[in-house]
């Protein structure tokens, strides 16, 4: 068989002329497969290194963007030995403490800010990061076949197709079973959704220098979005259609979620029943027993009176008010998990009537370094950066708002009175969505002034109350409440 096969090959003029023997064909195929696997392995390793860098290093270092917290890393593999870089990444402090001259120099050049230790990373992971830094290249501008700068002027058919894709009525070509609307709500909600709403996406897309939707959906840069969009590989044309829908949605906004008016319907129901009872009592007289008319009228009046009193008492009171803010800011993450002091953001609380709302610059003190949130990825933090770029401040919505005829000073309570923030604002450190904890009624304030004891010891603010100090020293009284220093005087709050 072998001789016959060789004889047939020798009879093939094409094979003999080209010299391309079966062995050569097999070798060429093997080389092709080898290079394909090698390229795939390199790409996979580089992608792994990129993800590790973004997760562990990007908050302090840039590649090709200049110094951030730590030094610029472009060309670091040419300036330093690879083994030294690996040791420094794993535990820079140990190298500094051991007196390594280069490590000490880097430490001093960067304001003596120590680099975090990464003993949790394996040797392979550290090498992946170094490989990524070494082989990093500026991102090449991708050429699109659609107009990625288009914001308005879409055809009705393009908007309609994008809408159907967004709601999952048309499947995506390359997979993705969940509709966009299942994560990005198009109707107002009373619960926190960390995913941006359709209105948020539309607003961000339509802003000048806003979200590059083609880059965001084509190459997600945050872990949150990578996980959420893992099954989606949208084509340029599909992103174009969704862009068309968002451009239209930016004019419409979220559909209002209306709550059924239970109290109003109860009011109308009893008004109707009382009217029927009166008509029958005076004119038609269908019901024989008048006691039924009287009971219906009395119950109706009681219900109406109760509703009127409750609604009157709650007039201008907004307890549990929790509006949607322009940025999904979690006090639980900042004040609770990260232990950020309230006064860092609300710096006027000790000196002013108002506690103050932090400016963009205060937010950027942290978020120039922290570029991605654990729940919302980069979307919400990018709003701060866009605001800083445009010079337009974030328009936060005020939650606690007293009537104009009431005087209240945070400095008086938080500074002089040493009242803790939680006393009035509740467990802010546990709130993802900030809400009004107290009803802020006059009765609530009066009761607090009656019950709250003033700390006279080592508090110069109360040094002028000599009589009360003498009574405390003599043992005539054992404590002083706010009421005793004029806390119930009308003119204190209504001047």
Image (cartoon, rainbow, N blue to C red):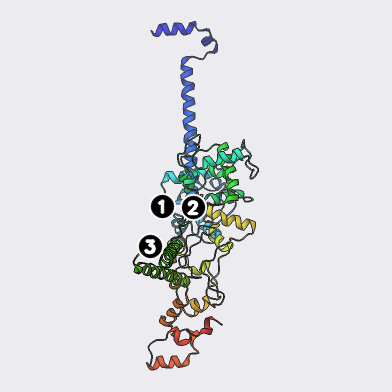
Instruction: Give percent across and percent down for residue 41.
Output: 46, 35
**Residue 286, numbered label:** 3
Separation of residues labelled 1 and 2 (CA atoms): 28 Å
Quadrant in which the N terminus is drawn? top left
Looking at the picture, tell me which residue is in the foreground, 385 or 366: 385
Above or below: residue 421 compared with residue 109 = below
Above or below: residue 28 compared with residue 216 = above
Q: Are marks 1 and 3 in contact (CB under 8 Å)?
A: no
- Disc on the earlier residue, 3 or 2: 3
- Disc on the earlier residue, 1 or 2: 1
Residue at the disc numbered 1: 119
Looking at the picture, tell me which residue is in the foreground, 15 or 375: 375
Above or below: residue 280 compared with residue 466 = above
Say left or right for 67 vs 179.
right
Asked if one can make out residue 138 in the rendered structure from this viewpoint, the answer is no
Instruction: Give percent across and percent down for residue 490.
Output: 51, 84
Instruction: Give percent across and percent down for residue 142.
Output: 60, 39
Secondary structure at badge 2 equals loop
Secondary structure at badge 3 equals loop
């Amino acid at each position: 068989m072998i001789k016959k096969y060789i004889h047939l090959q020798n009879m093939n003029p094409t094979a003999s002329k080209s010299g391309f023997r079966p062995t050569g064909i097999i070798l060429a195929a093997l080389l092709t497969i080898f290079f394909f696997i090698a390229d795939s392995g390199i790409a996979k390793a580089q992608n792994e290194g990129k993800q590790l860098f973004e997760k562990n290093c990007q908050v302090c270092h840039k590649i090709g963007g200049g110094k951030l917290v730590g030094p610029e890393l472009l060309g670091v593999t040419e300036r330093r030995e690879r083994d030294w870089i690996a040791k420094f990444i794993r535990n820079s402090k140990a190298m500094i403490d051991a007196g390594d001259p280069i490590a000490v120099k880097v430490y001093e050049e960067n304001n003596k800010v120590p680099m975090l230790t990464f003993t949790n990373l394996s040797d392979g992971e550290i090498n992946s990061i170094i490989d990524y830094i070494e082989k990093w290249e500026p991102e090449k501008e991708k050429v699109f076949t659609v107009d990625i700068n288009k914001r308005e002027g879409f055809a009705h058919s393009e908007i309609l197709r994008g809408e159907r894709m967004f709601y999952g009525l048309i499947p995506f070509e390359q997979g993705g079973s969940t509709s966009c609307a299942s994560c990005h709500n198009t109707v107002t909600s009373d619960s926190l959704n960390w995913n941006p709403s359709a209105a948020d996406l539309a607003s961000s897309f339509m802003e000048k220098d806003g979200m590059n939707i083609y880059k965001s959906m084509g190459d997600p840069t945050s872990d949150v979005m990578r996980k959420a969009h893992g099954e989606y590989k949208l084509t340029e044309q599909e992103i174009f259609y969704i862009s068309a829908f968002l451009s239209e949605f930016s004019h419409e906004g979220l559909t209002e979620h209306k709550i059924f008016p239970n109290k109003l319907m109860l009011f109308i129901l009893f008004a109707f029943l009382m009217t029927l009872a009166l008509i029958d009592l005076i004119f038609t007289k269908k019901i024989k027993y008048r006691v039924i008319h009287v009971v219906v009228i009395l119950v109706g009046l009681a219900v109406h009176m109760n509703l009127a009193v409750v609604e009157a008492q709650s007039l201008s009171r907004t307890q549990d008010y929790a509006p949607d803010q322009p940025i999904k800011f979690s006090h639980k993450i900042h004040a609770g998990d990260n232990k950020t002091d309230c006064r860092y953001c609300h710096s006027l609380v000790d000196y002013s009537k108002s506690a103050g709302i932090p400016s963009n610059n205060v937010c950027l003190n942290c978020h120039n370094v922290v570029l991605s949130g654990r729940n919302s990825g980069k979307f919400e933090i990018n709003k701060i950066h866009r605001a800083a770029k445009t010079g337009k401040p974030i328009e936060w919505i005020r939650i606690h708002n007293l009537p104009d005829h009431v005087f209240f000073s945070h400095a008086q309570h938080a500074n002089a009175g040493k009242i803790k923030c939680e006393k009035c604002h509740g467990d802010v450190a546990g709130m993802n969505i900030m809400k009004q904890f107290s009803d802020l009624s006059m009765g609530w304030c009066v009761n607090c002034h009656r019950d709250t004891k003033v700390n006279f010891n080592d508090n110069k603010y109360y040094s002028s109350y000599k009589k009360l100090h003498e009574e405390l020293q003599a043992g005539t009284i054992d404590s002083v409440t706010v009421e005793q220093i004029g806390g119930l005087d009308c003119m204190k709050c209504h001047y």
